[in-house]
Amino acid sequence: MTASRYLVISLFLLLGSLPFGQERFGSAAHAAEETPKDMLAAQIRTQGFTCDKPQRAVRDVKQSRPDHEVWTLKCEGATYRISRYPDLAAKVELLR
């Protein structure tokens, strides 16, 4: 193998390990990410509750446990406490 060919192969390997191509896929993945407020609002909407404009979601650390999250979701017209277990419907309480 000649020195120039070795250099070209080394450059291809080096450039292949850099994150240049990641932006093409990373931007689509980033666009697909939802914030907790959007995800929680979508979940309670599927359960029949109204939350058209979610404003914020705060995780209640004191009430949350492993595999059981408790959130307070503030929407434009209401505030909800949401208890979530994996693979089950959320328990939703109207606070205001």
Image (cartoon, rainbow, N blue to C red):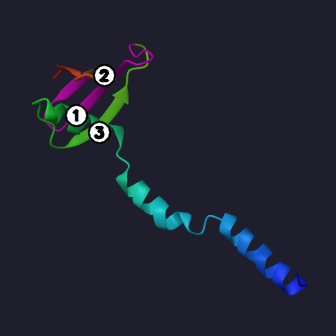
Q: Which residues are magenta?
A: 63-81
Whole-number angstrom distance, CA of label 3 to CA of label 2: 12 Å
Residue ID at (13%, 35%):
77
Q: Are marks 1 and 2 in contact (CB under 8 Å)?
A: yes
Is 80 situated above or below 3?
above
In the image, residue 86 sits, relative to residue 22, either above or below, namely above
Left-right relation of 64 to 84: right
Q: What percent of the width, then of the height, locates residue 96?
A: 15, 23
> Where is residue 78, by image quadrant?
top left
Write down the residue under mark 1. Answer: 43
Q: Residues within 10 Å of mark 2 (few under 14, many from 20)?
A: some
Classify mark 3: helix, strand or loop.
helix
Q: Earlier in the sequence, mark 1 or mark 2?
A: 1
Which residue sits at x=16%, y=37%?
51
Q: Amino acid at mark 2?
A: Arg
Give the amino acid at mark 1.
Gln
Q: At numbered mark 2, what does the secondary structure look like: helix, strand or loop?
A: strand
Give the CA distance from mark 1 to mark 2: 10 Å
Q: Residue 39 — which label?
A: 3
**Pointers 3 and 1 in contact (CB under 8 A)?**
yes
Residue sitting at x 77%, y 76%: 9
Above or below: residue 45 compared with residue 64? below
Number of marks in the rendered image: 3
Residue 43 picture quarter: top left
Residue positioned 38% across, 21% down in the render: 60
Label 3, label 1: how many angstroms apart (C-alpha)?
Answer: 6 Å
- Is 26 included in the stretch rendered in magenta? no
Q: Considering depth in this image, is 62 or 76 the residue closer to the camera?
A: 62
Residue 76 drawn in magenta = yes
Give the class, few, some or many, for how many residues have Cα within 10 Å of label 1's Cα (few <14, many ≥20). Answer: some
- Residue of label 2: 84
Whole-percent x, y for residue 3 in the image: 90, 83
